Image: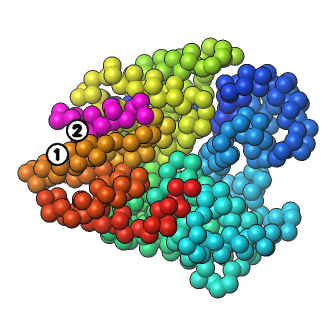
Amino acid sequence: MATCGSRTPIHLSIQDRIAWLLRVNRIFGKEERWSRAASFAAAFQGGSWQALADASKISRWETSVLRVPRQAIIRYEELLGLAKGQLVFAADAVHDYYCTEPNCHMSWGRGMPRATPVPFTRTGELIEKASSGDAMSGQEWHELCSVISSAPNFLIVPVTTWTTLSERLLQEQIIADGMAWLPRFGALSKLLGHPVGQQAAIDTCASLAADRANQAGIEVICMLDSTSHPDATRHVLSQLANPTSESVFYGALLASVRKLARGHFNPHQITDLMSVAVDLVVGPGGHLDSQMLAAALLRQMPEGAPVGLVNRLSRSLATNEALGVALRTGSLAPPGAAQDLIHPVVSTAVDRMPREAPWPYDETLGILLEEMIYNPISDVRLYAAILVRATPYRVPIANALAGALSRIRIASNPDLVACIVDAFRVFGTTDQRPMIERFILGQSVPSQVAIAAARNIGHIDGTSHDRFWLSAINTHAKNVQQNSSPASSAVIRGLIYGLGITGNDTLLARIQHSLALPPQARQAASWWLGQPQRIRRSALL
């Protein structure tokens, strides 16, 4: 597999990532005066931050010497004139993903117990709003679930309200995108970790994962990686043994990576999990994404694997170089290969900043780009992209990667191209949309590139004309009917997903009633149209 590669990965701590996020936003922000730490510190007190902050403290925050309080991140947003939540929700997501200690959330200023009384009136209003047909913004979901998570004995009457909240929140989350998605994702994670509310949240995720009509399989089962509750672990393992769909299986495998790191499995479950991973790696005809994820999972396994599994794995890796590299290095290609792409992209992005950088090369950005393109764990790629999206680097990096794609031979490097297209899902702009459309329509485009383009186009800024959507769906429908093409089936699923999250009900209705299209396409369109309008409108906020 001529794909992505990396040197031995350099580990970035949670503090390193958040410090970098703040540093580049201040230095490259809209107002040049804030690029000087002394000026920024002099204005820092106020708004969400009432304490003093001198240039030394700003420096120590931004170099990860000191942990940055969550309220300080909100103050960065206020002073820099950023959208509410742009920095803090990105920091929340990264913190929650990489934090593996049971109580480390408490050092982030969001933990239990509360230092002040619960605001019962406001909280009651939010619960009533979420339980009704009224729209709920992502900020309101965050506010509500933050209060709930800070009170371990928080009770709601009637108890069925927990299910009502979980179901609505998950429904909105799988439709939401970007800055509407992040706070909902964090809010559901809080419910999944709450001693009283978690059972309803777990049951909600498991129920939707078991629904064969569901069009968002990966996310709903993968959410269960955030809780150690035995039922969550049981549901994940059940989907590995008897999956509802390929996407739900992949989501369960992805959840297992983080659950293993957090110690959610007992020794017997780890042995079963290892067997699943080895079967994926050594078995014929497996999907490459799942095989690479299985290799990443095996890297985390404790010592003492059964001899039979080790022997099977050794024989397979002897004939599969790509999987061997992934298992040995935690990357998708031999060490050093990444720098030919990463270094010029980083240098180009730094050169396009509004003012001169205090560094010739942004090492942290380079590490994040390696993670974003070369890590076999798709969640690692996602959170690296989320950080980049929340900085002034977003557009220069998107443009530089698009430029790099124009110089890559797609036929020889389809997996590398698919990795980059996946990154555009998070920070792609309108400038990249025509290229994504070409990848979907091109007759000679490798299947993995077309599939990646289709599953991501709905998330990329801008819109595509209805002519494109119809042409793409009809082209791939013919491939399905004439050749039973699994790749074209996957492309159609991705395209209908894109129509669903962007709310193109006119085309969805047309697809739903078109007998010329495969039944799976009509069923998928019907599922999206069946989502309540109030939920779909609310998910945009």
225 is higher (above) or lower (below) than 50:
below
Left or right position of 399 against 179: left
The answer to whether residue 460 of the structure is visible from this angle is yes
**Residue drawn at x 80%, y 65% as measured from the top left:** 113
Q: Of the residues under marks 2 and 1, which one precedes in the sequence? A: 2
In magenta segment, residue 527: no
Residue 528 in picture, x, y percent from top left: 36, 63
The Cα atoms of the two marked residues, 2 and 1, are separated by 8 Å
Residue 509 in picture, x, y percent from top left: 28, 62
- Magenta segment, prevailing SS (helix, strand or loop): helix
Residue 58 in picture, x, y percent from top left: 81, 31
Residue 268 in picture, x, y percent from top left: 47, 66
515 is higher (above) or lower (below) than 392:
below
Give the magenta part as a residue range: 430-451
**Residue 441, numbered circle:** 2
**Residue drawn at x 76%, y 69% as measured from the top left:** 122
Amino acid under disc 1 = Thr
